[in-house]
Image (cartoon, rainbow, N blue to C red):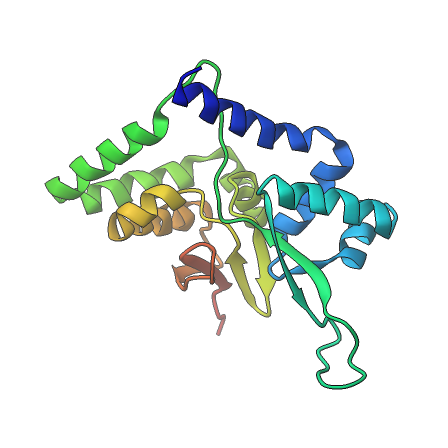
Amino acid sequence: MTADDSADDRTLDVLGVLGDPVRRRLYRYVAAAPDEVGRDAAAEAAGVSRSLAAFHLDKLAEAGLLTVSFRRLSGRTGPGAGRPAKVYRRSEGEHAVSLPPRAYGDAGLLLAEVLEEAGLDRELQAAARAAGAGAPDAAADDVVEALRARGYQPFWDGGTLRLRNCPFHALATEFPALICGMNLALVEGLAPGEWFPSMDPCPGGCCVSLSKKKTD
């Protein structure tokens, strides 16, 4: 068995953990949550008992799909505050598999490198904005659903629509100016009219947030 075979097996094992429908519901709930999630909230969201939710959440953590920490959910400290509860959040790691293996990530890195070296930021942003504006779901004027369909995992933070996930995380890490500019332009295309996208990073998430334009 080659090193690539072993890596593929590990990824398949991780993704296989999500074969259980309850586990998938729990993972989706935790992954989309802006904050850490306790067992009670996860169980209620998935429609299962607390003990069953705890079992599946720990299996997801063992597979590296969730990370675990402990904190007091009541917010109280000191004597009588109770024991810290086990809480979960989505792991920062990425897992993807294609059969047979493909190398789209490598191609993306090469293309980004060429675009950056050629100084084609504005051209890339124009293409991204046009792509967003031309998307059929953008014309439907359901911006939240359009963002959710693209993996951004939007959530409301007061009057600001923040994006829990960056679909271009690997590329943005290597080429932040190029990819974040492209991302902002894409969201501008997806969210015309009353929306105002801006560079306002969400901790651990996307660099773009959206707010409604003020009307006179």
User: What is the x, y in percent for residue 79?
Assistant: 77, 86
User: What is the x, y in percent for residue 120?
Assistant: 16, 42
| Residue shown at 84% from the left, 45% from the top | 52
Is 131 above or below relative to 205? above
Is 183 above or below relative to 83? above
User: What is the x, y in percent for residue 98?
Assistant: 47, 21
Is 5 above or below relative to 63? above
In depth, the one of 15 and 149 nearer the eye is 15
Would residue 26 be visible to someone looking at this image? no
Would residue 73 be visible to someone looking at this image? yes
In depth, the one of 163 and 171 nearer the eye is 171
In depth, the one of 53 and 165 nearer the eye is 53
| Residue shown at 25% from the left, 41% from the top | 124
In depth, the one of 151 and 91 nearer the eye is 91
| Residue closest to the far right | 49
Would residue 158 appear left or right of 135 to someone viewing this image? right
Is 80 above or below relative to 62? below
| Residue shown at 28% from the left, 52% from the top | 176
| Residue closest to the far front | 1
| Residue closest to the far left | 118
User: What is the x, y in percent for residue 146?
Assistant: 54, 42
Q: Quadrant of residue 190?
A: top left
| Residue shown at 44% from the left, 15% from the top | 1
Q: Quadrant of residue 39?
A: bottom right
